[in-house]
Image: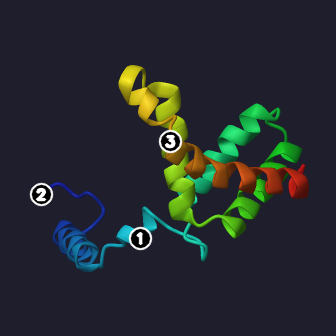
Amino acid sequence: MGLDLGFDLEQGMKSLLLGLCLLTALPTRPEAATAMGDDGYPTATRAEYVFACMATNGGTPEALRRCSCAIDVIASVLPFESYERAETVLRMRRSAGGYLGQEFRTGISNTIVTGLEEAQAEAEVRCF
């Protein structure tokens, strides 16, 4: 005399085991975590830019449209590697103090940031 749960426990365990085997057999997709557009800009980088831009511009649907346009323009005129370098310099200028902060205010650093500033100016003209 056993407990009737309304389903075949043995069959259920077999199905669960089969499902786990199939799940582990699937190839992993690390590219999904770092999905990139054709221009090399990761989706996360685009989203981060749009969120920051929207926060600065009122967080409205219109801001979403304009900010999305802006990152598209930036991506079309500035390679991602240059964008990443300029963003790093700007972040270090904001967060690093003392000697380390001075290293990110040199002529070379200014040249790196100039490319991003020019791309942002182009985005401003086209999108805002």
Residue appearing at x 37%, y 29% in the figure: 100
Q: Secondary structure at mark 3?
A: helix
Within 10 Å of disc 3 (Cα), the crowding (few <14, some 14-19, many 20+) is some
Q: CA distance from mark 3 to mark 1?
A: 26 Å
In the picture, the disc for residue 31 is 1
User: Which residue, given by chain and number where applicable, does mark 3 sit on?
Assistant: 89
Within 10 Å of disc 1 (Cα), the crowding (few <14, some 14-19, many 20+) is few
Q: Left or right? Give the position of 19 relative to 127.
A: left
In the picture, the disc for residue 2 is 2
Amino acid type for the residue under numbered disc 3: Val
Q: Secondary structure at mark 2?
A: loop
Q: Quadrant of residue 57?
A: top right
| Residue located farthest toward the left when viewing the structure as drawn | 1
Closer to the eye: label 2 or 1: 1
In the picture, the disc for residue 75 is none
Rendering coords of residue 78 (x, y %): 64, 64
Within 10 Å of disc 2 (Cα), the crowding (few <14, some 14-19, many 20+) is few
- Which residue occupies the foreground of this view, 23 or 39? 39
Q: Left or right? Give the position of 55 relative to 16.
A: right
Of the 4 image quadrants, the one containing the N terminus is: bottom left
Residue appearing at x 73%, y 33% in the figure: 55
Asked if disc 2 and disc 3 are in contact, CB closer than 8 Å, the reply is: no
Q: Left or right? Give the position of 99 relative to 86.
A: left
Rendering coords of residue 15 (x, y %): 25, 74
The colour scheme applied to this rendered structure is rainbow
Residue appearing at x 81%, y 55% in the figure: 123
Residue 49 in sight here: yes
- Which residue occupies the foreground of this view, 11 or 78? 78
Rendering coords of residue 97 (x, y %): 42, 21
Q: Earlier in the sequence, mark 2 or mark 1?
A: 2
